[in-house]
Image (cartoon, rainbow, N blue to C red):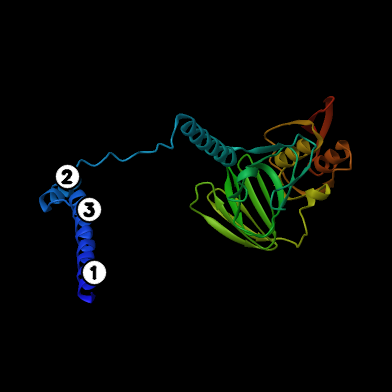
Amino acid sequence: MAMKKQEEYHKKEQLDWTEIDRFGSRLTTEWEESKEAIWLRMEQKLTAPARPAKVIFFARPAFRLAVAALVVLLVGLGSVMRFHSRTYHTIPGQHLAIALPDGSTVQLNAASVLTFRPYWWRFSRELALEGEAYFQVSKGDRFTVISSNGTTTVLGTSFNIYARDEAYRVSCLTGTVKVTNARGNQDVILSANQKAEWQSSAFVRADMKANHEPAWVNKQFEFTGRPIREVFDEIERQYGIRIISDQSLNFEYSGNFNKEESVHQVLTYICKPFNLNFEEKKTGQYQVLKNQ
C-alpha cells in the first residue's frame, strides 16, 4: 500500500516538471534570437545615418529688427551725449552767471561766448571761451578752457581768462593753473595771485594783488598800462555803445571806473589825461578827438 502511494507521488512529481519544461520551452522559442541576428540588429543601429540636429532660430525678423533698433538708439544716444553742446552769449552791457553740471560756476563778461557739452560733462570737463570769464571750479577731474589764443587747465581753483582778438591773459586767484599757448609748444604754471599774458612769442608772468574775484565781476574795471583802444573796447562792451577814435592814438591808460557811472563820466576820466575830447554824434555813438 505504501509502495503504491510512493509510486503515484513520483509520477505526479514527474508530470509537474514535464509541464514546466514545456512552458519554459515555449518561452524560449518565443523570445530567443540568434547571436547573428542580435549583432546584425546592433550594427544597423550603429551605422544608421544620424538624424539632422534641430536648429532653433531665435533671430526671427521681428527680433532682428528690435536688436537693430536698439543698436541705433544706443548709437544715437551716445552721439547726442558726445556732441550736443550748449552755448551762452552775452550782448554788450550784459553779465551772465552760469552753473555747470558739477557745481562749478562761470561769470561771463559782456560780449563773450561760452560753449560746453552738458551730457558729456561727467566724462570731460571741457569748455570753449571767446571773450572773458571768471571760473570757480569744483575739485574733480581735469577742467579745461579752450580759446583760439590758448588753453587753461586746472583741477579745482578760481581763475579769470581774457581771450579777445590777439590778447590772451589768465589770472589765478586760488589754486594752480596751467596755461598753454595756441600752438601748444609753450606753457606756464600759475599759483594763487599770479597772472600771465601772451606777448609776441612768450608768456610774461607777474604777481598781482590778492583778490577774491576779478574787479569786473563787481562792476569795477581796472587798467594798468593798457592801450587806450583796448580801454575803449571795454567801454563799448559794458555800455553797449560805439566809440570812433583815430587809430593813431597810442596812449596807455592806467585807472579804473565803475559801471554804475554814466558813459559820459567814464569817457571824461579817460580822455582828460591825454588832452582828448569826445562828442556824441548820435544816440549810442561817440567820437573821440584830439584837442586842437
The N terminus is located in which quarter?
A: bottom left
**Residue placed most toward the observer, 238 or 285:** 238
Residue 234, quarter of picture: top right
Residue 234 in the figure: left or right of residue 200: right
Q: Is residue 128 among the parts visible in the rendering?
A: no
**Residue placed most toward the observer, 143 or 52:** 52
From mark 3 to mark 1, how far is it between C-alphas? 27 Å
Residue 193, quarter of picture: bottom right
- Label 2, on which residue? 44
From mark 2 to mark 3, how far is it between C-alphas? 26 Å
**SS at mark 3 in the image:** helix
- Label 1, on which residue? 9
Q: Nearer the viewer, mark 3 or mark 1?
A: 1
Q: Is residue 152 above or below residue 260?
A: below
Q: Residues within 10 Å of mark 3 (few under 14, many from 20)?
A: few
Badge 1 amino acid: Tyr
Residue 3 in the figure: left or right of residue 239: left
**SS at mark 2 in the image:** helix
Looking at the image, do the residues carrying marks 2 and 1 touch, with CB atoms under 8 Å apart? no
- The residue sitting at the bottom extreme is 2
**SS at mark 1 in the image:** helix
Badge 3 amino acid: Leu
Question: Which residue shows up at 20% across the image and 46% down it?
Answer: 45
Q: Is residue 4 above or below residue 143?
A: below
The C terminus is located in which quarter?
A: top right
- Please state the horizontal and vertical placement of residue 106, each as a whole percent of the image: 73, 48
Badge 2 amino acid: Gln
Q: Nearer the viewer, mark 2 or mark 1?
A: 1
Q: Disc 2 or 1, which lies upstream in sequence?
A: 1
- Label 3, on which residue? 27
